[in-house]
Amino acid sequence: YDEVKEMLPIEIDIKEFYKEVIVERSREKKYGDLATNAAFVFSKRINKSPIDLAHQLSERLYFPGGEITETIPSHPGFINFKLSNKFINSELTKILKLKSRYGTNQTGKGKRINLEFVSANPTGPLHVGNGRWAALGDCLVNIFEANGYKVIKEYYINNAGTQVELLGRSVLARCREILNLPSEFPEGGYPGKYIYDIAEILIEKKGKDYFSYQADKIIKDICIQSTEIMMGRIKETLEIMGVKFDIWFKESELYKSGLFKQVVDFLEKKEFIYVKNGAKWFVSSQYGDDKDRVV
């Protein structure tokens, strides 16, 4: 950064530099081991072609530590670097000594991050999309921890709302179907085979007579039992993937504590919430979101 800043007749913000300038493996080994797009980033700002600027920077870049033996410009404007054998041998020695601690730093020492990810609704098994977010989230945890941050991994269990009641009513309908009792599958219910699996578990646990009661008397308990069974399966899947969480937070606890109402009241007082089409909306678009969200 310092050398490039001195070479170019423009102001270069350090945050901008590290955001836009990339160092990656060279596309062709004949050009070197690493390559950077620095010439592309700054060429327009000084009215010069990327390849001309690449040549200029290559001639003037200096590495007093001996890490780089040669800088090679290549079309259409990359700057390539050849690593010295001395540097490679030194880094290999460090890797053997430090093992998993190699490349870590303490940038985030003393700082805490609460990272909530996956958080799939407990109304069905995890799908491929959930698995992708599990992998990405866990990788982010590793990156933050490698930079010295203390990371708390949270799974938010959405166990309060219409989708959970629909799960419970779907399971109740399958329980009664299996037991040859009068049943009606709810409109928009969950049709998967796993609903039958949950039903079998509940029948064994509760007994046949339990499902003869009116639905309104037992639906709350069935919702709770069904979500617990589904969360058990979700946890098993995540365990197989090697993804572990520190906190499993239930949305129902949020409402019980009264914290949800307190937060909404606070946001309304600060005018961060408005009413439109009969719903309350949070002004999330003012904080990087692509649109406002219903509370």
Image (tube, rainbow, N blue to C red):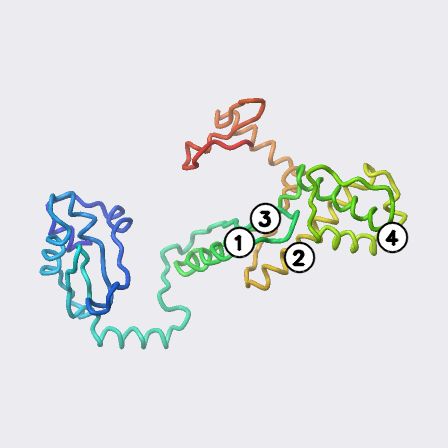
Q: What element carries label 4?
A: loop
Sequence-earlier tag: 1 or 3: 3
| Circle 4/circle 1 CB separation < 8 Å | no
Asked if 24 appears above or below 272 in the picture, the reply is below
Identify the residue at image location x=48%, y=28%: 272
Q: What element carries label 3?
A: loop
Identify the residue at image location x=78%, y=47%: 174
Location of mark 2 (residue): 233
Location of mark 1 (residue): 153
For the residues labelled 4 and 2, the Cα–Cα distance comes to 22 Å
| Circle 4/circle 3 CB separation < 8 Å | no
Task: Look at discs 4 and 1 and give the one toward the viewer.
Answer: 4
Q: Where is residue 129 in the image (x, y as percent from the top left)?
A: 53, 51
| Circle 2/circle 3 CB separation < 8 Å | no
Q: What element carries label 2?
A: helix
For the residues labelled 2 and 1, the Cα–Cα distance comes to 19 Å
For the residues labelled 1 and 3, the Cα–Cα distance comes to 14 Å
Location of mark 3 (residue): 120
Q: Residue furthest right?
A: 209
What's under tag 3, amino acid-wise?
Answer: Ala
For the residues labelled 4 and 3, the Cα–Cα distance comes to 30 Å
Sequence-earlier tag: 4 or 1: 1
Location of mark 4 (residue): 207
For the residues labelled 2 and 3, the Cα–Cα distance comes to 12 Å
Pointer 1 local density, CA inside 10 Å: few below 14, some 14–19, many at least 20: many
Q: Where is residue 144 in the image (x, y as percent from the top left)?
A: 42, 56
